[in-house]
Image (cartoon, grey):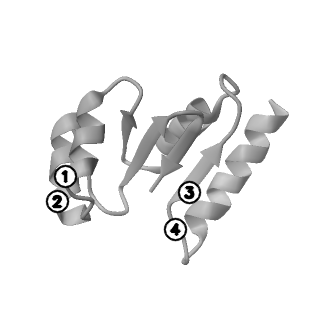
Amino acid sequence: MYMYRKVSEYLEQWRASKYRKPLIIQGARQVGKTYAILEFGKRHYDNVAHFNFQTSETLAATFAENISPAYLLPILSHISGQTITRGNTLIVFDGNNSVVTS
């Protein structure tokens, strides 16, 4: 429980920063990285769009085409089945022992 609380406090500081950039969380497998991020998202955002690169071949192909947010956001909204809105949606990219949030 202590590690989860420490991670939660760090995530809350990250969210409150006016200079916030995408966050990369790396670590060993099966230690709770994804769980901590998804729980944080549920508490602090209207919705969470979670994408797992290990289970979706479509994602890698989508990012290979174009990485412009204007191009990607409508596609990611379609893939997740959710409307992704700035400031209200936590976007989580998961895979290879790393979790990236934006």
The three-letter code of the residue at mark 2 reads: Tyr
Of circles 4 and 2, the one toward us is: 2
Task: From the top left corner, tell me how far across and down residue 81 is, in percent.
Answer: 19, 35
| Cα gap from disc 2 to disc 1, whole angstroms | 9 Å
- Above or below, 59 against 12 in this view is above
| Cα gap from disc 1 to disc 4, whole angstroms | 23 Å
Q: Which residue is mark 2?
A: 71
Q: Is residue 81 shown to the viewer in this render?
A: no
The three-letter code of the residue at mark 4 reads: Lys
Among numbered discs 2 and 1, the one appearing first in the sequence: 1
| Cα gap from disc 3 to disc 2, whole angstroms | 21 Å
**Quadrant that contains the C terminus:** bottom left
- Above or below, 88 against 52 in this view is below
| Cα gap from disc 3 to disc 1, whole angstroms | 23 Å
Residue placed most toward the observer, 62 or 5: 62
Category of crowding for the residue at label 3, using alpha-carbon neighbours closer than 10 angstroms: few (below 14), some (14–19), many (at least 20): some
Category of crowding for the residue at label 4, using alpha-carbon neighbours closer than 10 angstroms: few (below 14), some (14–19), many (at least 20): few
Q: Which residue is mark 1?
A: 65
**Quadrant that contains the N terminus:** top right
Q: Which residue is mark 4?
A: 21
Of circles 3 and 1, the one toward us is: 1
Label 1's element?
A: helix
Task: From the top left corner, tell me how far across and down residue 25 is, in percent.
Answer: 62, 47
Q: What's the residue at 58%, 52% (across, down)?
A: 24
| Cα gap from disc 4 to disc 3, whole angstroms | 6 Å
Label 3's element?
A: strand
